[in-house]
Image: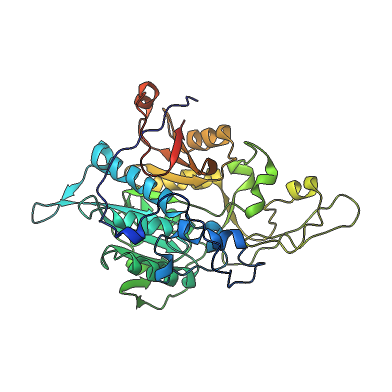
Amino acid sequence: VARVPYHMEHIQFPVQSPSDLVVGDVIDTTIPNPHDPNIVHDKYWAQRRRLFSRFDRGCQLDSEGWYSVTPEIIADHVANRVAHLATNFPALKQSTGPDGQPQGIVILDAFCGCGGNSIAFGKIPSHIVSKVVCVDTDRSKLLKAAHNASLYDIPKDKLVFVQCNSIFILKYCYKNGDFVLDQPTTTLPRHMPPPVMPTTHAGYPVGGLDLLPRHIDLAFFDPPWGGIDYEILGKNGYDLEKNMKIQVDPTPCEEVYEGDGDGVGDDFFDNFTTPKHHHMSKNARKKNFNKKTEGEFVNGKELVKLAAEATRSRVVLFDLPRNTSKASLGICALGAGYRGNIKLEEHYLNGRLKTVTAYLGSDYSGLINDSSVASDDGVSGDEA
């Protein structure tokens, strides 16, 4: 692992009005939190404009979105990285359309939630990124994401919102970037997604598998981590294979908890919501983190492999907990067939580490000898 200075490439995003720009500290405690603090903690409400600079225009979040959406300045930074890859990495070389004009790449945002990263990708000029496929199993999240995208004036033909399990899409819909669900196969899906009523929301198409494009070039994943209690696993303690579990089948899952032998239990949480009780000891909470026993799941190692096999370029980005084990990430990459190196960016806001993004599928060895430092977007980052 080599830690190298932060370096920022530049891309021209659409011009924002001065009221949209996030400058300095954007914490606002002047307006009382209108939500139940057990659902939306006061500290998250105070930082609402970090999540969306246009929050006051009517951005929508559900209870999980308050804790899981990527802050806009980080989402824009990752989108900037994607734009640089799309214009410089040979495997993502842009094709030309019938009119001879360059066509942008197609991005799969596999766990789009309320749209933070999808919107950032949508800001990239269309000749670099032509389509963003926003996938989530929760229709209400997709509708909120579409609404939020409209507040940022993202072109209506650039985002499509697909209600489906992302694991199904990776397993059965794409192979090496090409759509294969309609091709003859000997491997039939165990579960077909239920029918989805198509609609248009805020001008964007929302529906099922029929909205999927014929190919995808690059995939971005901000998968569920298992709850906000992931830090109980300790520094570098989050193991992608052991601690990440993503549900595959539609059967509701159950969590079975082990106490400390004193009969004390807890209604442990799986979503990004505030826990109602913390009766468990630290050791019991660690033992029971994301402990599901019912249903079929894919772990982090399997997810990396599925993503690599589904995309045309094998360029895959993962947003991960800040305490992710780098060794487990390397094992996952090797298991997916990657060789060479991985770039891992640590995202800091106001000096505090918020999250990390792993970039797989390109060669970043040149960064080791890059001594340039630039930080003009409000985000600092270390690359490993």
Residue 51 vertical position relative to residue 328 in the rendered view, above or below: below
Residue 231 visible in image: yes
Toward the right, the furthest residue is 262
Which picture quadrant has residue 264?
Answer: bottom right
Mark count: 0
In the image, 17 versus 368, the foreground residue is 17
Residue 219 vertical position relative to residue 56 in the rendered view, above or below: above
Please provide percent x and percent y for residue 145: 42, 67
In the image, 35 versus 270, the foreground residue is 35
Please provide percent x and percent y for residue 330: 52, 33
Identified at 48% across, 47% down, the residue is 319
In the image, 241 versus 71, the foreground residue is 71
Q: Is residue 281 left or right of residue 112?
A: right
Toward the top, the furthest residue is 369
Please provide percent x and percent y for residue 295: 63, 60
Please provide percent x and percent y for residue 324: 58, 40
